[in-house]
Image (spheres, rainbow, N blue to C red):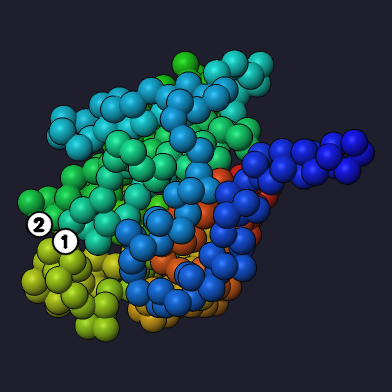
Amino acid sequence: MRFALRTLVAVILILSASPSQAGETAAEITAAVKKIGPVIEPAKTAELFAPLQKKEPYAGVTVTRDQKYGADPRNLLDVFQPATADPAPRPILLFVHGGAFTGGDKHQAGSPFYDNVALWAVANGMIGINMTYRLAPAHPYPAGAEDVAMAVQWTLENAGRLGGDPRRIFLMGHSAGAVHAATYIARPELQKVKGGGLAGAILLSGLYLLTPDTDGPPQRAYFGQDLSKWADRSSLKGLVATKLPMLVARAQLDPPIFAIQGEVLNRAMCASPRDCPTYLVLQDQSHMSEVYSINTDETRLSGAIAAFVKKPR
């Protein structure tokens, strides 16, 4: 009888385990990410991490989709709040997705991405907002950063009714989204609120110094065919000039150009009078796994973001 009871308990534990316990182990997922290698493979990477993510409806979270922040059909926000409001206002995490300047979205039906980022924000004491934006080639530079400016303004103006703290808005961008976020920070003339309206920024695997080495069809679609204008459209100089606290991260398995760009930004900021950023190289992570793994048991990046947001300022 005791043996049968122990066996039943063991079966229940296996069935109730997280996907990383009952299905692929963390080691197996790491091996699969490494096998994909230093390339950008959204679909293959999503297959690894989607089973680890929560599925709708999300318990304890209120999701309000497609809030308009501008006139374009893609000027939309998804807002994630705790179902029960806190007595104290929460920090706000505004996330800008990637997509090679010409694609991508904040959410697609049936996919857990990028809901996972906003869900993680709510679970860690924040309000989560995912934005989408106009795309190249129909909307070239600086359209993405202009849309970030409108989204930041909307977030600031609506922070109170969302249960958020307007003094603690954190802008987070990945890949092309990091480029748009960086341009917004670096170009005060694009900002619609005094001082930029941010308490900090998180930049993941972006491009900050545009050179012929960063050339490619997506970059030309957004920044233009005339490479002589690219240096002036780079965000590096403006990022170094700002005093805004930053967390900068890249993946070990990023394509080489993104790894180089992360090092360039970190070194330039540390060589300037401003403070060094918090800088992370995410071992065994790839361009896509670094964000697809947020809100799973892989906490190297998300833990650093939580500490960054909670740091007294």
Q: Earlier in the sequence, mark 1 or mark 2?
A: 2
Measured along the vertical axis of the image, is residue 247 above or below residue 52? below
Which image quarter is the N terminus in?
top right
Which residue is more in the foreground, 61 or 169? 61
* Residue 192 in picture, x, y percent from top left: 31, 37
* Residue 160 in picture, x, y percent from top left: 49, 19
Q: Quadrant of residue 301?
A: bottom right
Query: What residue appears at the point 19 percent right and 75 percent down from the top-left corner?
Result: 216
Q: CA distance from mark 1 to mark 2?
A: 6 Å
Horizontal placement of 226 versus 282: left or right? left
* Mark number, residue 212: none
Farthest residue to the front: give it: 1
Tell me if I can see residue 284 in this picture. Answer: yes
Query: What residue appears at the point 49 percent right and 75 percent down from the top-left corner?
Result: 34
The answer to whether the residues at label 1 and label 2 have Cβ atoms under 8 Å apart is: yes
* Residue 28 in picture, x, y percent from top left: 57, 67
Measured along the vertical axis of the image, is residue 72 above or below residue 247? above
Which residue is more in the foreground, 292 or 5? 5
Measured along the vertical axis of the image, is residue 176 above or below residue 75? below
Residue placed under numbered mark 1 in the picture: 222
Amino acid type at mark 2: Pro
Disc 2 crowd, CA 10 A, few/some/many (<14, 14-19, 20+): some
Q: Secondary structure at mark 1?
A: helix
Residue placed under numbered mark 2 in the picture: 137
Which image quarter is the C terminus in?
top right
Farthest residue to the right: give it: 2
Query: What residue appears at the point 52 percent right and 31 percent down from the top-left corner?
Result: 127
Which residue is more in the foreground, 11 or 1? 1
